[in-house]
Amino acid sequence: LMIPNMYKIAGELLPSVIHVAARTVATHALSIFGDHSDVMATRATGWAMLASASVQEAHDMALIAHAATLESRIPFLHFFDGFRTSHEVAKIHPLSDEDLLAVLPLDGVLRHRSNRMDPDKPVLRGTAQNPDVFFQAREAANPFYAAVPDIVQGMMDKLAERTGRQYHLFDYTGHPEAEEVIVMMGSGTGPVHETVSRLVADGQKVGLLEVRLYRPFSAEALVAAMPQTVKTIAVLDRTKEPGQIGEPLYQDVVTAVVEEATNGRVSWEAPPRVIGGRYGLSSKEFTPAMVKTVFEEAAAPDARRHFTIGIHDDVSHLSLSFDSEFSTEPEEGLRAVFFGLGSDGTVGANKNTVKIIGEETPLHAQGYFVYDSKKSGAITVSHLRFSPEPITSTYLIKEAEFVGCHQFDFLEKLNVLGMAKPGATVLINTRKGPDELWDKLPKTAQEQIIEKGLKVHAVDGHGVAEKAGLGGRINTVLQTCFFALSGVIPTDEAIEAIKGGFAKTYAKFGETVLERNYAAVDGSLEAMYE
């Protein structure tokens, strides 16, 4: 992000939008993974900041950002979590051209174009000002910023009229008389939604306030969305600013609560206590178990003012301990985990699987892929979820109904079967035949298969791929076997959809490449054994 240029763009009231997959800023070490440290470095530039928490929201908020910047003349930074949202494959409801036209202010487009540089209508820009006028000119932008919250809410309302998906500057979910409320933004709201639903069903008075418009920050809108019964607000930030009294969102919430309370605009008997925590730096996992612990901490009379969650901090002792066994994963649906090597085609095949199931069935689908910065040749783990209900689980799968091990030696190096639920189906890619496979399995794998009652299937993916002329690309073989074993959709329909995908993807490479992939699909099920 070119921060000096952002100051200039905002100062000149130039409508513009930057879409950012928020990632970690290098500090003691470089990290390619996700948190909010980069976007938080821009919050003083004068850009409005709009946060998305899911793939669908990123799609919707992109339109809102473009519409709002044209109407307000304030530039917008629309951000969503790097990797967790930016690299997720999910089933969404796309906006149509008619939706775009209904929300975008066409008069704003014409106004923006009329402000272009034109020799027939000269204007003076980029001047150097002295103390006599600079202060006054800087303050002259205040009305533009004051109008942004209402403009953004207006665009959200227009979108809701077209799609039924209603957003607000701050969205509250939970008990109507909640006493403990978490305030946060980004993909971490997914596990909080799940945990709130579970705890409220158990009789607890908890809730989530999700921030969508972060800049300009509307204290009035935040307090209006907050239950008046709240006693403790736990603000969770996905960034760390050493030396500050608190992280950015925490400071904003504290200021909003104090200002609104002292101005008499709320009916609290006493202003709620505000505590702040850090989570998820550099894509560190954030799960319902951690959310539950945050609510327990918020309810404690001696709750820590500042804490971390998701790590064990044995240096400054700020971390909260949590019960990792707590889970809110729904029973319905299918969870599948695949272990592969970077560049062996596993990730690409799983992305196609999500697309096939999302397009061919009414099921909701989600795919998330874990790999490190080495990428090619490194271990990849694909996490796939399929469910009749919308999927909000923005965290890794712990127990899966299907486990695919695409490299046999992973069974010795990794606890692959540790992620299998009792009774789960396991698919192993191996050159070993049915007479020797059991004896070649590591003892720990044998024990887990027996203890959990796992249904183990195997296929020589490399042999099938080589016979079909695909070399080491085993993804087609194993994808076909997955559909046959999982039963998510009928095998015949799955094979037809896979081959249809080949026609789109590989047609440009010629008929020979297509025929090789078709042959790999047809030979996969014959080669698989139990």
Image (cartoon, grey):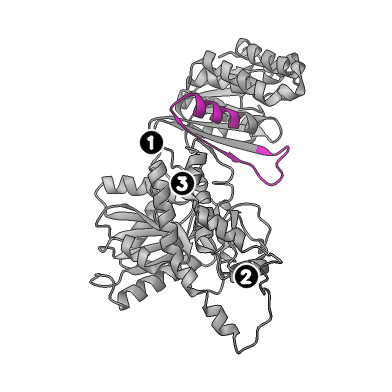
In percent of width and height, residue 101 lies at 50, 45
Look at the image and tell me whether residue 157 can be seen: yes
Report the side of 375 relative to 392 (left or right): right
For the point 46% across and 46% down, which residue is it? Answer: 102
Q: Are marks 2 and 1 in contact (CB under 8 Å)?
A: no
At 65% across and 87% down in the image, what residue appears? 130
| Residue type pointed to by label 3 | Ala
Residue designated by label 1: 330
In the rendered structure, find residue 7 and report the number of the disc placed on it: 2
Q: Nearer the viewer, residue 311 or 484?
A: 484
Dot 3 falls on a residue whose secondary structure is helix
Residue lying at the far bottom in this picture: please name it: 132
| Upstream in sequence: badge 2 or badge 1 | 2
In the picture, the quarter occupied by the N terminus is: bottom right
Q: Residue lying furthest top in this view? A: 526
Q: Quadrant of residue 524?
A: top right
Query: In this image, 200 relative to 192: left or right?
Result: left
- Which label is found at residue 278? none
Q: Position of residue 260 (x, y in %)?
A: 33, 73
Q: Amino acid at mark 1?
A: Pro
Magenta residue span? 350-379
The amino acid sitting under disc 2 is Tyr
Q: CA distance from mark 2 to mark 1?
A: 46 Å
* On screen, residue 11 above or below 167: below
Label 3, on which residue? Answer: 102
Q: Quadrant of the C terminus?
A: top right
Callout 1: SS: loop
Residue 481 forms part of the magenta stretch:
no
